[in-house]
Image (cartoon, grey):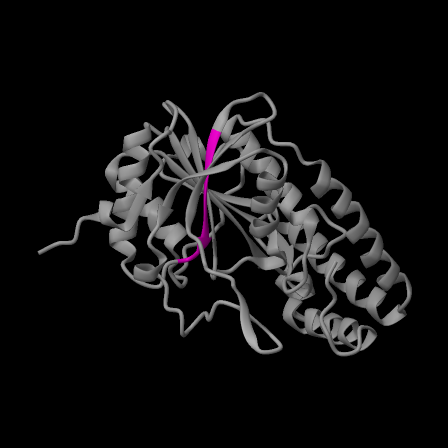
Amino acid sequence: MALDPEDLYEVDSDVPDLGGAVLLHYFDGFMDAGSAGKLVAEQLLNSSEHRVIARFDVDRLIDYRSRRPAMTYSIDHWEDYDAPELVVHLLHDADGVPFLLLTGPEPDHDWERFCAAVRGLVERWDVRLTTGFHGIPMGAPHTRPLGVTAHATRNELVGEHRPLPNRMQVPGSIAGLLEFRFGEWGHDASGFAAHVPHYLADSTYPSAALNLLGAVAAATGLNLPDGELREASHEAEAEIARQVAGSEKVADVVRALEQQYDTFMEASGKESLLAESVEHMPTAEELGNQFERFLAEQNGGDSPER
């Protein structure tokens, strides 16, 4: 006997009319280079009053032994337990337009049942679009324009974003499965992945989050404030520039990445990718490893957090 997806969540008794609203989602636990998706979710929650209108049963969805929640021990007793939450927040943009944010740990179990449960909420509230966001590492320097990869259940939802030029198989995620299933069910869904220089993938990189927030705002029509992210981005770029200027070795690495990026962009519209000139250059991974080692040395062995 199939379990009822509605048993996975509880809904607040006082939910206003949400017809035509957008549901955004971000889940901890999957790839998020530069913490781009996490920063966007935090920006949304910090820039608007919000309240929880639906709560999922994490005891059924989360494997606590693989992702143990933090507990605080004080002297002779347990003082606090950081219980995981997978919830839907009701927020409003700068124009007062309501929208939803589903966020929390990515479910470990019952993916199909969870997707069906989210579908139930989408249809219950007459949500017009579901959109996810996160960051992905790219072999590109921070000194060049960083893009955003878009994908959706309909071509019209991708907009002017350039699609990836190839077909690939990657590890699945609940965000990806949600978009895939929603397409099968006839619901509009999309996703955005901000490009993050791979040597900054393990750091906090607000510039990528800023690009991501802009893409989400453009796709949804929401007026999403970005002041805090913009300020953090300026500070992070200044710190990166300081570290690059402080070492000729690092500057050489960045210049090599710039050359590789520029060569690719110049050739991207031609039949040949100028393989001969690119062939003898260090790979993006090799250059990134050099940069990461330098930054670790400058920070006492730890990756820099910005």
Compared to 123, does 269 lie above or below?
below
**Going by the image, does 174 lie left or right of 222?**
left
Q: Residue at x 38, y 51 (%)?
A: 176
- Write down the region rendered in magenta: 99-106
Q: Residue at x 69, y 74 (%)?
A: 289
Outermost residue to the left? 1
Asked if residue 34 lies in the magenta stretch, the reply is: no
**Going by the image, does 170 lie left or right of 133?**
left
Give coordinates of residue 280: x percent, y percent: 69, 71
In this orientation, does residue 71 appear?
A: no
Q: Quadrant of the N terminus?
A: bottom left
Quadrant in which residue 226 is drawn: top right
Give coordinates of residue 266: x percent, y percent: 68, 48
36 or 94: nearer the eye?
94
Asked if residue 100 lies in the magenta stretch, the reply is: yes
**Going by the image, does 1 lie left or right of 223?**
left
**Going by the image, does 283 lie left or right of 70?**
right
Give coordinates of residue 142: x percent, y percent: 73, 54
Quadrant in which residue 54 is drawn: top left
Q: Residue at x 56, y 28 (%)?
A: 93
